[in-house]
Image (cartoon, rainbow, N blue to C red):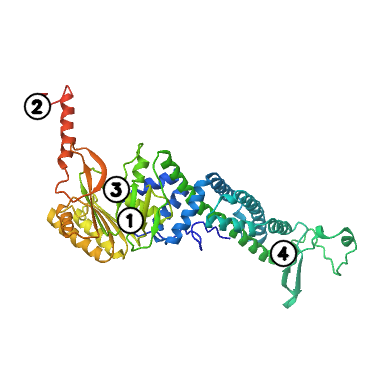
Amino acid sequence: MKALLMHQDRDFDLNQPSLWNDGDLTQDLDLETLFRGMAGDDKFLFEVSRKALLCGINNDIDTILYRQDALKDCLQNQTVIRDLYALVIETIDQTRKQTWGITSHYPSSMLYSATDLLAMLVVRLRKLRDTALASAERFNSEAFRKLFATLRTELDDEYLTTIEDDLTISKFRSGVLMSAQLGECNESADLVLRKPADRKKQKWFERLFRKRLPGYTFHLAERDEAGARIFGEIRHRAIGRVAVALAQSADHVLSFFHMLRAELAFYVACSNLHAKLVSKGEPTCFPVPTPAGERRHHFRNLYDVCLSLRLDGRIVSNTIDGDGKNLVVITGANQGGKSSFLRSVGLAQLMMQSGMFVGAQVFEGDVCSALLTHYKREEDPTMQSGKFDEELSRMNRIVEHICPNATVLFNESFAATNEREGSEIARQIVTALLEKRVRVFYVTHLYEFARGFFARKREDALFLRAERQSDGSRTFQLSVAEPLETSYGEDLYREVFEESEQNLIQQPNSIIPATAD
């Protein structure tokens, strides 16, 4: 059986290789905060969330919509989903205590352990089926409809009862019935385990007057150790195949529970995050994915989900129409919300392509073939290279993995050198990316770079500016506007130094006199 809750035709692979740039994405987009918001202290939920988000960039539109429908069902039936997940977790925890004998080299130990484990799993399968089918009519998604149909058809009462009866027989409480032939040198050959007659289905007179097969009886002496060993070996040979078959069956059923746990975990984690955002009054929506290359990218009230998780209050959002745009240049005042906006764009793209909701009231965007980030970094502490060399090295790795319809997020890149050189390098790199049908979001203080693209009046370029009020305060919102030559660094100077000076003046033991300018 397959769960098929995350893909239409295959199981979710928790061991699939990670993206080559998962470390950069995690650092630049603050994904650790997102994963903790989804998983809390649960390490398994954390790992499933990490794998589903970072590998979700490879999903096609059908898979995205498939998961969205399943997640909608989960958000409307959270109690049912959490009950199913708790039941699966309880089953897996219980099986850990009963699997030691399955790996034994002795057929008898393997047989008894597999029989006991299967008997327990059959009980859990019946409970899983009953729990799911009791609420099946509330679910409308293809994913859960298929799962419930599988549980209904493949685990009906007749089938489960047959399994339980066969497991009772496999305990061989009345001995082992087998047939054999004499082989070379009168050794036993062609050992075949036989199924004993089902006396429950026989009438009393059939059991009383049944025809007995002719045969001979051999009684083993009490102290015949060699004979006992030989009979034990014959018995092991007879039940060996059955032991292996039962062990494989137990492993198959157990793998279904493990897979169901992983796929339910994704939806449980999404429900956790959704509950946290809704409790703060933050909007969420299911995005509309469009084919790669259509350049559909507009949203209303998009916000940084990770920032919302770290702060108590609600987060300022942005509304932008970027349809048909290949280049988005973001400039404006320092600490005006540019980096948060860039992070919100990257988070929304990852969440959409993994099949989740996004932090916005409306979001529509085309799927990208890859999501890459190039953010400024601190100086190399090992002093093996300078800051600018490190930026170029990371850019080289991006170029090696770039492909058409990818999205690259730049955050103050190439600012480690002078204005003219940094602007020229940024211009050449961005121009080359645009020629290869790569979408670029660029937060920058390089005025020459931003002004140069603005002067060209490209129809596929959008210029946003972080707002600043006349008194120097920030609204943390972005609006469509041409780049300015200043980033208002004097605002930060006054905030840091004038406030520090004022604090020192107010301290009675300050070394700065109260009359100082």
Q: Can you give x and y, in whole percent of width and height, for residue 43 in the image?
A: 45, 47
Chain-order first, disc 2 or disc 3: 3
Whichever of callouts 3 and 4 sits on the residue coming sooner in the sequence is 4
Q: Amino acid at mark 1?
A: His
Quadrant occupied by the C terminus = top left
Give the camera-side residue of 360 and 176. 360
* Residue 151 makes an appearance in the image: yes
Outermost residue on the bottom side: it is 184
Which label sits on residue 235?
4
Which numbered disc flags the more N-terminal residue, 4 or 1? Answer: 4
Which residue is drawn at the image coordinates 33% and 41% (left, top)? 315
**Mark number displayed over residue 297:** 1
At a point 55% along the width and 44% down the height, the residue shown is 79
Number of marks in the rendered image: 4
Is there any visible trace of residue 26 in the rendered image? no
Residues at marks 2 and 3, CA–CA distance in whole angstroms: 41 Å
Q: CA distance from mark 3 to mark 1?
A: 14 Å
* Cα gap from disc 3 to disc 4, whole angstroms: 71 Å
Q: For the point 45% across and 57% down, which residue is it?
A: 65
Q: Which residue is mark 2?
A: 516
Q: Comparing marks 3 and 4, which lies closer to the viewer?
A: 3
Mark closest to the chain's N terminus, 3 or 1: 1
Question: Of residues 194 and 218, which is closer to you in this image?
Answer: 194
**Quadrant of res 62:** bottom left
Q: CB under 8 Å between callouts 3 and 4?
A: no
In the rendered structure, which amino acid carries the disc numbered 3? Phe
- The residue type indicated by label 4 comes to Arg
Q: Is residue 40 left or right of residue 335?
A: right
- The residue beneath circle 3 is 341
In this rendering, which labeled residue sits more in front, label 2 or label 4? 2
